[in-house]
Amino acid sequence: MSDNLPKAIHDHNTLKFPEGFLWGSATSAHQVEGANINNDWWQWEAQRPLSFRSGLASDQYNRYEGDFELVKNLGHNAHRLGVEWSRIEPADGEFDTSEIRHYQQVLNSLKDKKIKIMLTLWHFTLPLWVAKKGGWENPKISFYFERFVKRLVPEIKDFVDFWITLNEPTVYLYNLYIDPKWPGGKKTWLLRNIKTFFNFTSAHKKTYRVLKLLDPNKPVGIANNIQSFEPFHKHSIPEQLAVVFSDIVTNHMFYFFTKGTHDFLGVNYYFHYRLDHFPTISRPKKLFSALVGDKQKFRDVSDLGWEIYPEGIFDILIDLKNHLPVYITECGIASTNDDRRTRFLIHYLQEIFRAIKSGVNVKGFFYWSLLDNFEWHLGFNPRFGLVEIDYGNNQKRTVRPSAYVYKEIAETNGIPHKLLKLLGHGMRVEELIKV
Ligand code: BGC
């Protein structure tokens, strides 16, 4: 390994990323727009305490112009965002042209600022009418989704540079069946789970084909939650098997069943697990990821208890090394401590740099997220944003210092050695951005 790996981390130069690298951040429609009253989440949230309802969220539906000014001023050259199906098709087969116009304006605002656009067509929410017909369990969903895509794409394709058909279908399935905590969630038979999985693969494949007809030159992919696994005891064969099993199910299965319908790999990276048993069907919660629980707690974790493990992103990237380009479509930390966010960013980017130098074709990085936002069943407490939202004060935006560190990285297209050095000396982010 050692000979090919870059010595650049010890170099006294900027760690330069490949030319044309995309630097951006990501959001999803329901998490930032606000007032998505016509989808399954909104309905489900209505039975929950107020602080767990999306409400106005970050109110980006009305404030997109200001937010995209920020995107530009923070040095990003790309942005990932989503459209909300329930706004565009509020009833079965009925399309709202004023909402389509709204999205044209949103996308136009980014285009005006010369920001490359990665657009997500589905990110966890369903129009109520689709949910009432069984949502992703209904085999007709791929037809409904395809019809939606066919209607929308011609209207917005000139703005879009990259298409994401689906966001994290396996995470959705996990939260629906394995550890049910999302709208429509329930414990169910594995067979049902598998059928729903194939409704997703079919929707992706159909959408891929439609996009290739309507907009042939734009790359199409999904944003997949890719997780890094290792055995807790290096020499344990059951744990090694657990790693192989979890890796196949979580990271490779969707690609396997949708082979030939991806122009790039969209990687959402958040999780590293040390597995200490083989997941079994009798313990379905552990089926997808055999979590370690207690053994995780001595590690450095985010405000959500997710382990901070930069090496994991290197490992998963090496594992995905093939001919397809890779975009990190999401990677971020929930933290109210901006020093941690800064260290997180730099350390994860160093590992991505290492992966690039080892031959992985990584072409872009989208930090999750531009703004603090509605973190699904966890409400508003987790703070992922480069920009803070004051929910008690009219959704006021305040740029966090880490956003300026990221700006410097984006503008130099690399990690300046100065940043690495000062970080190594334990310098606080506020001081860092003055240097
Ligand atoms: C999802 C986002 C979510 C983020 C942090 C990803 O799995 O795509 O919607 O906010 O993780 O939990």
Image: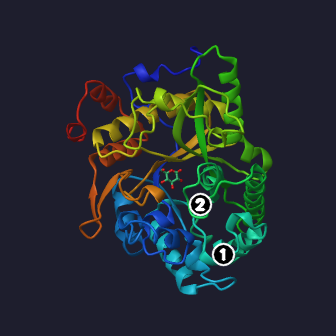
Q: Give the quadrant of the N terminus.
A: top right
**Residue placed under numbered mark 2 in the picture:** 161
Q: Report which quarter residue 286 is drawn in.
A: top right
The amino acid type of the residue labelled 1 equals Lys
Which residue: 67% across, 33% down?
Answer: 279
Q: Residues within 10 Å of mark 2 (few under 14, many from 20)?
A: some
* Percent position of residue 196, x then y: 74, 58
Question: Is 23 located above or below residue 414 in the figure?
Answer: below
Whether label 2 touches label 1, CB < 8 Å? no
Instruction: Name the residue nearer the viewer: 285 or 259.
Output: 285
Comes first in the chain, label 2 or label 1: 1
* Percent position of residue 291, x then y: 56, 34
Instruction: Name the residue nearer the viewer: 64 or 147.
Output: 147
The amino acid type of the residue labelled 2 equals Asp
Residue 146 visible in rendering: yes
**Mark 2 or 1, closer to the camera:** 1
Instruction: Name the residue nearer the viewer: 273 or 384.
Output: 273
**Residue placed under numbered mark 1 in the picture:** 132
Which residue: 59% across, 49% down?
Answer: 179
Q: Report which quarter residue 249 is drawn in.
A: top right
Q: Residue furthest front?
A: 282
Q: Residues within 10 Å of mark 1 (few under 14, many from 20)?
A: few
Question: Is 168 located above or below residue 310 in the figure?
Answer: below
Taking 320 as reference, is 111 left or right? left
